[in-house]
Image (spheres, helix red, strand yellow):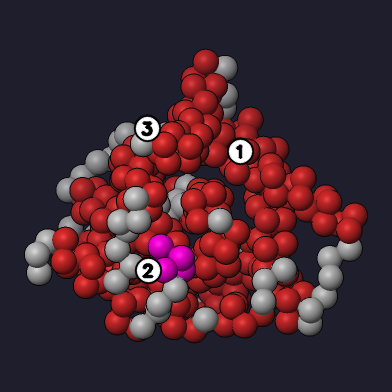
Amino acid sequence: MDVILNLALPFFGLIALGYIAAIILRVEESGLAWLNALVWYFALPSLIFQTVAEAPFEKLLNLPFLLGTTLSTYLIFVVMVAISIIIFRCRLHVAGIHASAASYGNVGYIGLALSVATFGPEAAIPAILIFCMDNAVQFILVPLLATLGLRSDDTPPGKLVLDILRSIFTHPFILSALAGACFAAFSLEIPTPAKSLLGFLTNAAAPCALFAMGVTLALRKIEGIGAELPVIVIMKMFIHPILVLTLLSLIGETDPVWISVAILMASLPTAANVFIMARQYNAYIEGASSSILITTLVSAFTLSGLLYLVDKGLLPVHITELLAVFGL
C-alpha cells in the first residue's frame, strides 16, 4: 500500500489537480500552449539529454532489448490495423489511428518520469530507448497509412518520405536523445552551469507534464465509441505488456530492471499525440479522445496494481513466471 501512496498517488494526484483546475478555472486548450511548450521543448528534452549524455555508451546499444520492445509495439499496431480493416471495415487512415491508440502509450509525459521514480536512475536509459523507438514506429506508420487511405491525396512518394523523416528528426525528444548519445559516445562533459540549468528543467518535467495531462483530459469528451474501443483498450492495457514480456523472454533479455521498465512502459495509457494525429488526418477524432480518457482511467487501477507487484517483488520478469501464476 505504501508504494501506491508514495508513487501512484502523486502521479495521478497531479493529473487530478490539472483536471479539477481545468473545470473550475474553465481553462481552454489554447491556454495550455506555454505549459506544453515548457514540457515539450525544454523540460523533458533536458531530462532525456542529461540522462543519455551521462550513460555508458554501450548501454545505448542493447539491440536485443530494442528489438523486443519495438517489435511488440509494431505487432500490436499491425494486428489492430488488420482487425480494423477486416472486422470493422475501416479505411486505412482510420485503421491507422485505431492502431496507434492500441499501441502508442504515453511514454513521454508519464513513462519517463514514472520509470525513474519507480526503479531509480538506472531505469532512465531503457525508458528513453523505448520512447525513441515507439515514436519512430508511430511517426512512420500513421502518416504512411493516412496517405494510402486518403485516395484523393496526390502527395508524391518523395514528399511523403521527407515528411516522415522530418517528423522523426525534428522531434525535440529524439533530437535531445541523439545529442545526448553524441556526448556519451565521445565522453564529453556537460559544463557545470549548463548542468545546473538542465537540473532545474528536469525537476520541472514530471509535475508540469502530468498537470498538463490532467487539463488535456478535462477537455476531452467520451464520444464516438464503437465496437472497436474495447478492443483498443484490451490491446493497449493488457496484451501489449504481456507481448513485451514474452518477446524479451524469447530474445533472452535478463536485466530485471530493463524488463520491468519495458512492462511498465507497455502498460501506459494511450498517448495524447494520438488525438493530435487523428485531428491532423481527420480520422477517428472523437474515438481517439475517448481512447485517451478511458485508458487513462483504467491505468489508475492497472498501474497501481503493477507498482504493488514491483514493491512486493512479484512482477514477472520472464514469461515462465507469468505462466506459473496461472498454473501453466
Q: Residues within 10 Å of mark 3 (few under 14, many from 20)?
A: some
Residue occupied by mark 3:
221
Q: Could you tell me which residue is drawn at 62 percent across and 82 percent down? A: 58
Spot the residue most to the front.
312
Residue that mark 2 sits on: 73
Q: Is residue 1 above or below residue 327?
A: above
Q: Is residue 39 above or below residue 251?
A: above
Does residue 294 appear to the left or right of 137 in the view shown? left
* Residue in the foreground of this view, choosing between 214 and 192: 192
Q: Earlier in the sequence, mark 1 or mark 3?
A: 1
Q: Position of residue 161 (x, y in %)?
A: 55, 78
Comparing labels 2 and 3, the label whose residue is closer to the camera: 2
Q: Which residue appears farthest toward the top when viewing the image?
A: 24
Q: Earlier in the sequence, mark 2 or mark 3?
A: 2
Mark pair 2, 3: CA separation:
26 Å
Any magenta on residue 177?
A: no
In the picture, measured across the screen, residue 100 lies left or right of residue 272, that is: left
Residue drawn 57% across the image and 82% down it: 61
Q: Quadrant of the C terminus?
A: bottom left
Q: Main secondary structure of the magenta part?
A: helix
In-front residue for pair 16/311: 311
- Magenta range: 256-260
Q: Which mark is residue 207?
A: 1
